[in-house]
Amino acid sequence: MLILNNDEIESLISVETSLRFLEKAYSQQAEGRAVYRPRTDLYLPETTRSGVYAFKSMEGGLTDPPVVALRLNSNVIRWEEREGRTIKRKIPQAGSGKWVGLILLFSAETGEPLAIFPDGVIQRWRVAGTSALAARYLARENAATLGIFGSGWQAGAHVPMMCGVRTIKRVRLYSPTKANRERFAEEMERKVRVPVEVVERAEEVADGADILVAATNAITRVIEPQWLRPGVHVTCVKDCELGEETIRRADRLAIHCRRFAPLNYIAGFGDREIEVHDPVDLVQQGSGSVPPLEPPFWVSAPELKDLVAGTIPGRKSDKEITCFINNIGLGLQFAALGAGVYADAKSKGVGREVPTDWFLESVHP
């Protein structure tokens, strides 16, 4: 069994390979040769004083290569108000300044465990890769200006990924904290060798942008509907960054999948499945009845797999406003990128091997 760390994964993964592995996985999904289990989040609000404990998991399987991946996170989280927006913050492990996120990779031929590695690098590349893959079908061919909201971990992958599917000549950036956006601009200019312009107001990002990306930790709207101009392509890492009014401005819409939110299980609410992205009000409430949650209007939109398979058209004209809602993560993404990284690591002798027998048992499970 192979053990990898994030630095090793970073040395193996690239924009090109990420897009290739993801596109192949979505093709298999469209053909019925891949499967995933919806993401579930389990909350125990009263176990820690630092915030709220949350356990997240998802999984996915492919037939080519034959693998299954399980991704899990064990976190203490806190919702905070910052500059008029609600953000979700993950609290590092006490004393270490680190977090818990793991991917377990299994063979779908023999059932044996193949690898275990942290999810951090693969997490950002699979989200940004999915957004960029959608942009390959929905953004204008001549899209040259990228506008991005956010200067964190996810934003840092979206810039090179978008440069991988379009010839980006200029990036416009807004993030609420000046020091963060200036640092991010310098980092991105070194990485993609494209001028990055820092703006003082959020609405300035949309000025002349061909592609607009919201990649923030906000759980409230980031991109206003009046900022969308004919011909723009807009995307996000959570649908709440756009909100209903902004999404309705789109002439052509695609979504990641029809599971519009995780299935949440919250102590105090019995075994009820609560389908919502961030159940902050319910967690703080602690117990009681849950009002019926109506699916969003966009839930019946075409999925990314349909775009990849060619069963629905991409952009039809340069005047269309197109939108991709990267609404929820799929275990399928971790199977695709995890399998690619694993194969590359084995061929190059990267990582540390431990006896597979350590993870097996003689007792019939």
Image (cartoon, rainbow, N blue to C red):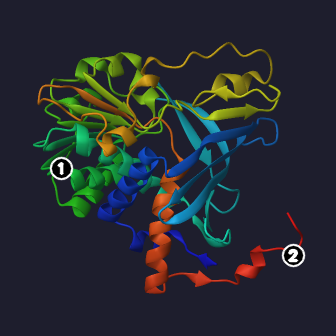
Who's the residue at 36% across and 15% down the image? 245
Q: Which residue is disc 2 drawn over?
A: 362
Horizontal side of 11 relative to 312 (left or right) equals right
Q: Earlier in the sequence, mark 1 or mark 2?
A: 1
Residue drawn 33% across the image and 20% down it: 246
60 lies left or right of 47: left
**Could you tell me which quadrant the N terminus lies in?**
bottom right
What residue type is disc 1 on?
Arg
Asked whether, in this view, residue 294 is left or right of residue 172, the answer is right
Q: CA distance from mark 1 to mark 2?
A: 53 Å
Could you tell me which residue is drawn at 26 percent across and 49 percent down?
Answer: 162
Which residue is pictured at 35% across the width and 44% down the height? 131
Q: Which mark is residue 166?
A: 1
Which of 100 and 317 lies nearest the eye of the viewer? 317
**Residue 80 horizontal/vertical position (percent):** 57, 32
What element does badge 1 sit on?
loop
Determine if residue 14 is in view: yes
Q: Residue 43 location, x and y as percent?
A: 73, 37
Of residues 107 and 334, the one nearer the viewer is 107
Task: Locate residue 275, reporting x and y percent.
Answer: 62, 27
